[in-house]
Image (cartoon, grey):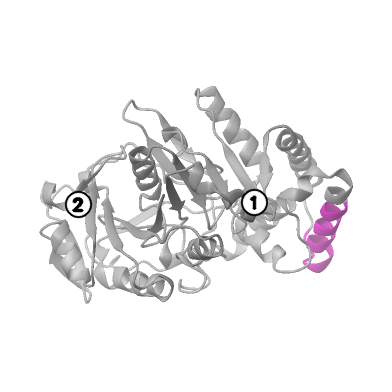
Amino acid sequence: MTSRIILGLAFGDEGKGVTTDFFCRLAERPLVIRFSGGHQAGHTVVTPTGQRHVFSNFGAGTLAGAPTFWSKYCTFHPVGYANEREALLAADVAPILFVDGRAAVTTPYDLLYNRKLEAHQQHGSCGLGFGATVARHEGPHKVHVMDLFDDFVLARKMEAVAAYYQEKLGVVYEAAVLEKLLADFQQAVSYCRRHLRYTSERAFFTGVGETYDALIFEGSQGLLLDQEFGYFPHVTRAHVSSRNALAIIRENGLPAPALHYVTRAYQTRHGNGPLTNLDLPGPALHPTPYETNVFNPWQGEQRRSLLDLHQLRYALSADAHYAAGLPRHLVVTCLDQLAGTWMATEGGQPIRLTGLDDLRRRLGGEWASVLGNYGQYGDLVPAAGISADV
């Protein structure tokens, strides 16, 4: 059994879904483990036959037949789970999801509070209640996945959550909107009771090597959004580094992992917050008809700029606090979008990249491999087969 941790090197949208799908297709019995973020993720996978899905509540290896373990470090949204499961079933995909009973549940109150707050602060949230859920769980007003299966426990905890937002934070909701969201939530809870498999981490990973031959730890967002290392307040309330994945590996005696750091061939940021190189001419790119990260009212347009080698090194040095000494692999996606010379910046000055090996050399340090991705499909090819000019 092997272990791989897949991390984004920037602000998300790097291609973690593509990379997860690729390594799942290489294995005979893969398992995807989500270890950060939650239901706000949007990881796009397209199969060679053209089947396309954006994964939020299931691992991005699902189309490759991989079950998902949803860890205690991730938020769980019953409505999102029910809707996405039904969408996958309608597409003739039978998703398998195991959820740690300690995972934090996102309620309608979290979602509404998140949206009210974001309307004023504009931190770049996607408006799905993730940050509000995590903040609430830092105090006593917790709702866990295991609570969804007990009427009395769930009712008491939902009352406490409602009081938490109304009395402590002075939030007043539109009655009709809240009533609809609560009805949808209760319907989704009933759905979870029929279909969701909840377990404990220790029980799940006991003897896991007899069932799976590859553990793919699928990260969320990117290292420059990590709550320890990102640029506050435009960060996520999550440890999106290898920290959580390594804790799961260590506590359950799993194989030492390889690290796969993913970046696009250029910088992107979907949502507010700093992005370097916006004062320079942007990357020359072909039109991207299959881009998932389009305009939405919470994050606006996706911004793009030249790859910044200093930012990549900063992200790598941040994760090295947890993963130093483990094998590192570099993954560069969206290479097919380059419409001319591949450009980046070094010390704020534009430079020409001559290929993936040039990028690896400039980043410094030891790299076990560098892989590149062309197009929306999940095939990754070694650096030797890729030219920087198109």
Of callouts 2 and 1, which one flags the residue occurring earlier in the amino acid sequence? 1
**Residue drawn at point x = 71 percent, y = 49 percent:** 145
Residue nearer the viewer, 274 or 141:
141
Provide residue 160's location: percent of width, then percent of height.
Answer: 84, 59
Q: Quadrant of residue 331?
A: bottom left
Provide residue 29's location: percent of width, then percent of height.
Answer: 43, 38
The dot on residue 218 is none
Which residue bears the numbered disc 2? 284
Magenta residues, start to end: 156-171
Magenta residues, dominant SS class = helix
Q: Secondary structure at mark 1?
A: helix
Which numbered disc, 2 or 1, marks the residue closer to the eye?
1
Judge the density around disc 1: few (<14), some (14-19), many (≥20) Cα neighbours within 10 Å.
few
Q: Is residue 265 above or below residue 317?
A: above
Pointers 2 and 1 in contact (CB under 8 A)?
A: no
Amino acid of disc 2: Ala
Which residue bears the numbered disc 1? 203
- Inspect this view and state whether residue 274 appears: yes
Q: Is residue 342 above or below residue 377?
A: below
**Residue drawn at point x = 70 percent, y = 57 percent:** 113
Residue nearer the viewer, 328 or 267:
328
Q: CA distance from mark 2 to mark 1?
A: 50 Å
**Residue drawn at point x = 75 percent, y = 55 percent:** 143
Residue nearer the viewer, 124 or 19:
19
On screen, residue 210 versus residue 129, left or right, reads left
Q: Is residue 326 magenta?
A: no
Residue nearer the viewer, 19 or 211:
211
On screen, residue 187 versus residue 327, left or right, reads right
Provide residue 250's location: percent of width, then percent of height.
Answer: 51, 65
- Inspect this view and state whether residue 273 appears: no
